[in-house]
Image: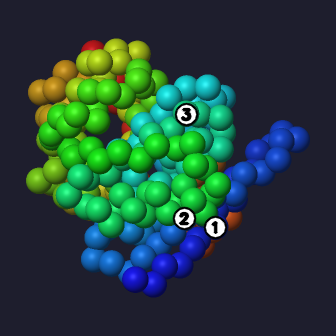
């Protein structure tokens, strides 16, 4: 399949060097083969909080093109990228993202939402969990939170940083958060520079219907 690459550039106000991340995109019906605006917003949040991920173990769920996870790795985190065991092309795209960014130390594992796999049992302690646009299809909402709950129970101090785009007023995770005994904090996009006309120097627009959340165990 034909693959194209998109480049994102993150710059700080300090004297540090900017960081570039390339994402491989494939023309495929799978959602995970394209870098959606939610991923750029989450990456901007990671960049804004890069001091919190340096030296930490970061796990990305539903990584796809892996923009937030690869950026976290370039900011000094130990990173594990995951996508569904049933989507081998998405897992291959995660590996391709590692290759084009020269991040051979980043691990790629199959993790299917709502299921506990042997790979999950052997993971070292996790500090930050990433997930961009995981709340895309309502039928997956509870499976996503079940997986997040599993990791937060094993790692009580961990945080789940996630972005989702409001596509319907009828779709909400509030009741599910209560069911799984999780708490949620919203971060305004302007707080971390994600309200600019474009994100990461790309042509992806910042979208004000995108929500940035931090979910933790109660």
Q: Are marks 1 and 2 in contact (CB under 8 Å)?
A: yes
Quarter placement of the C terminus:
top left
Residue nearest the observer in this picture, 95 or 156: 95
Q: Secondary structure at mark 1?
A: strand
- Residue 209: % across, % down: 39, 57
Q: Residue at x 45, y 84 (%)?
A: 2
User: Is 161 displayed left or right of 175 in the figure?
Assistant: right
Q: Count how many numbered circles sit on residues in the image.
A: 3
* One can see residue 199 in this view: no
**Mark 1 surroundings: few (<14), some (14-19) or many (≥20) residues within 10 A:** some
Q: Residue at x 35, y 18 (%)?
A: 155
Task: Say which residue label 2 marks.
Answer: 23
**Mark 3 surroundings: few (<14), some (14-19) or many (≥20) residues within 10 A:** many
Task: Say which residue label 1 marks.
Answer: 7
**Mark 2 surroundings: few (<14), some (14-19) or many (≥20) residues within 10 A:** many
Task: Say which residue label 3 marks.
Answer: 78
Q: CA distance from mark 3 to mark 1?
A: 22 Å
Q: Residue at x 40, y 52 (%)?
A: 63
- Residue 25: % across, % down: 47, 72
First in sequence, mark 3 or 2: give its number: 2
Q: Are marks 3 and 1 in contact (CB under 8 Å)?
A: no
Q: CA distance from mark 3 to mark 2?
A: 19 Å
């Amino acid at each position: 399949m034909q693959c194209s690459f998109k480049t994102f550039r993150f710059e700080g106000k300090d004297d540090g060097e900017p960081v570039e991340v390339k994402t491989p995109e494939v023309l495929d019906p799978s959602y995970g083969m394209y870098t959606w605006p939610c991923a750029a917003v989450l990456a901007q949040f990671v960049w804004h909080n890069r001091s919190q991920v340096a030296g930490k173990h970061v796990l990305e769920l539903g990584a796809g093109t892996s923009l937030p996870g690869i950026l976290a790795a370039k900011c000094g985190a130990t990173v594990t990228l995951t996508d569904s065991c049933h989507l081998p092309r998405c897992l291959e795209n995660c590996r391709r993202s590692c290759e084009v960014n020269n991040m051979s130390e980043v691990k790629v594992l199959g993790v299917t939402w709502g299921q506990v796999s042997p790979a999950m049992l052997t993971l070292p302690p996790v500090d930050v969990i990433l997930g961009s646009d995981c709340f895309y299809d309502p039928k997956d909402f509870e499976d996503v939170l079940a997986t997040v709950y599993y990791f937060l129970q094993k790692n009580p101090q961990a945080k789940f940083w996630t972005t989702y785009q409001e596509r319907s007023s009828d779709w909400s995770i509030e009741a599910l958060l209560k069911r799984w005994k999780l708490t949620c904090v919203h971060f305004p996009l302007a707080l971390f520079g994600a309200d600019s006309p474009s994100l990461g120097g790309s042509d992806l627009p910042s979208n004000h219907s995108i929500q940035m959340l931090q979910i933790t165990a109660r």
